[in-house]
Image (spheres, rainbow, N blue to C red):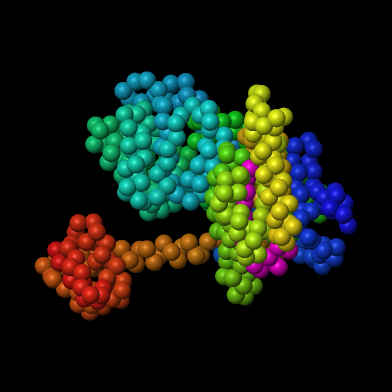
Amino acid sequence: MSNWQSYNSNLTRYSDLGFTLDLSLMDMTAGFSNEMQPKIDRALSDMVALEAGAVVNPDEGRMVGHYWLRDADLAPNDTIKAQITEPLAALKEFAEKVLTGEIAPPNGGRFENLLIVGIGGSALGPQFIYDALGEDSKLDTYFFDNTDPAGLDRTLRAIGGGLNKTLVLVVSKSGGTPETRNGMLEAQEFFESEKLDFSKHAVAITGEGSKLYNYATENNWLTTFPMEDWVGGRTSIMSTVGLVPAALQGIDIDAFLAGAAAMDKKTRSPSQSDNAALKLALGWYTAGNGKGEKDMVILPYKDSLSLFSKYLQQLVMESLGKEHDLDGNVVNQGIAVYGNKGSTDQHAYVQQLRDGVKNFFATFVEVRKGRDGVSIEVDPSITSADYLQGFLRGTRKALHESGRNSITISIDEVTPFTVGMIIALYERAVSFYASLVNINAYHQPGVEAGKAAATTFLELLNQVRGALTGWDKTAGDIAEATDNSTEDVYHALVHLAANGEATQSEGATPAEDHFKI
């Protein structure tokens, strides 16, 4: 088959959406679809059940409803439908009141800044949307997305004298996420140090009855918006988590939701050839032999989509990175995701992609429209947009000539509608792929294990603090006294010394270092 024939036979095109998916350079064999048909049938059936409200997260006994967020009529009952439509109406009303000045800072004027306090899906989604669509944002937006105190200080310095006109969104479903709680407390302390009433600036997005909900209610915050347990953090971008900040920024959230709904509708097709999300999942499957043997490199050729790879890291890796399948077998599934943007990649890691280890497949994201307005000629009859297209097409071809596979996704331009569309495409591809490899895409036991280990370390840290008082001892001495691992104790001691709670006298090796108050 010629390249042109392969292109035509492996292209999924939604002309009414300005979207194409090109799998012609994935070298999928003619018999692959037939071999996969039983798994394909199951994946299509699983998606129907998921959207109908089946419990598809058996470990937590939960439905998974992020697809209902862009079409509430799909919700399995009136209660859930109301949980979608009522907050959507309320957040639109709230955003309108903020942007018109009806809801305003206590010292007058209007809110001009937005500080979002969250982590994981509570921050990555809003960060991506703001970077992609927030160029004309009504509110300058900042993020506390870690518990790094120097990072928090840097963000507060960036807000500077605008703190009195800053609205704060604190986002945590449980209200117990340590990084978000820490960021909230740090923000509150800073507001109070500036003689500002934090409650008059603060909004919670959380589960009803959570620790954060109760704290916000007891302290008379401006308002709260709900997060439901049938929406996971990594798929919460079209819930209140993503829509409240987007509405406050003046982004067209109706178009955003409509784009996602349009892609959902297209990818409900039972025909493999017409279902872009299913075909994308099959491309991932064939690239990694259904075992994630190759990494996914995301290369968007548009500055405004530069955070897309970061967003997809969580969506794909947290969903698909699982030790066990649904039958309890150890499978160690997952697909590693990384990327930057074109043509920056030409001068970064494309050298390895072209000539190095063949441990990846690439995904090029093409935005056909270069810019609004007229472009100058940077060479005779050549514009900057021509160069960008040349780098995309040239890199794609060079990789394939070297035996590297790639997928190309094309959209007309970056708008709320098209961003909603490609988010929905990947959400559905993740769901389909999870079915193809028989895993639960909707829990995250590895994340919970990491949280538990962090709690254990904090408990050890306090033991070390108590044992260190008045001592001049080694890590081994304190480990023996507290019945803990010597290496764990040593790292706790170094942390205390680095932050001024102890002094450290270095010996020839860490075993000979001495610590004291």
Who's the residue at 26% across and 73% down the image?
A: 510
Who's the residue at 47% across and 24% down the image?
A: 99
Tell me, yes or no, if residue 107 can be seen here: yes
143 vs 336, left or right, is left
Who's the residue at 46% across and 42% down the image?
A: 205
* Foreground residue among 489 and 217: 489
* Foreground residue among 107 and 304: 304
Magenta residues (range) = 286-301
Q: Above or below — where is 225 with respect to 430?
A: above
Q: Is residue 461 magenta?
A: no
Tell me, yes or no, if residue 94 can be seen here: no
Provide residue 469's location: percent of width, then percent of height: 14, 66
Q: Above or below — where is 374 with respect to 232?
A: above
Provide residue 461's location: percent of width, then percent of height: 27, 65
277 vs 273, left or right, is left
Who's the residue at 27% across and 70% down the image?
A: 490
Q: Quadrant of residue 115 in the image?
A: top left
Q: Quadrant of residue 101 in the image?
A: top left
Provide residue 55's location: percent of width, then percent of height: 63, 59
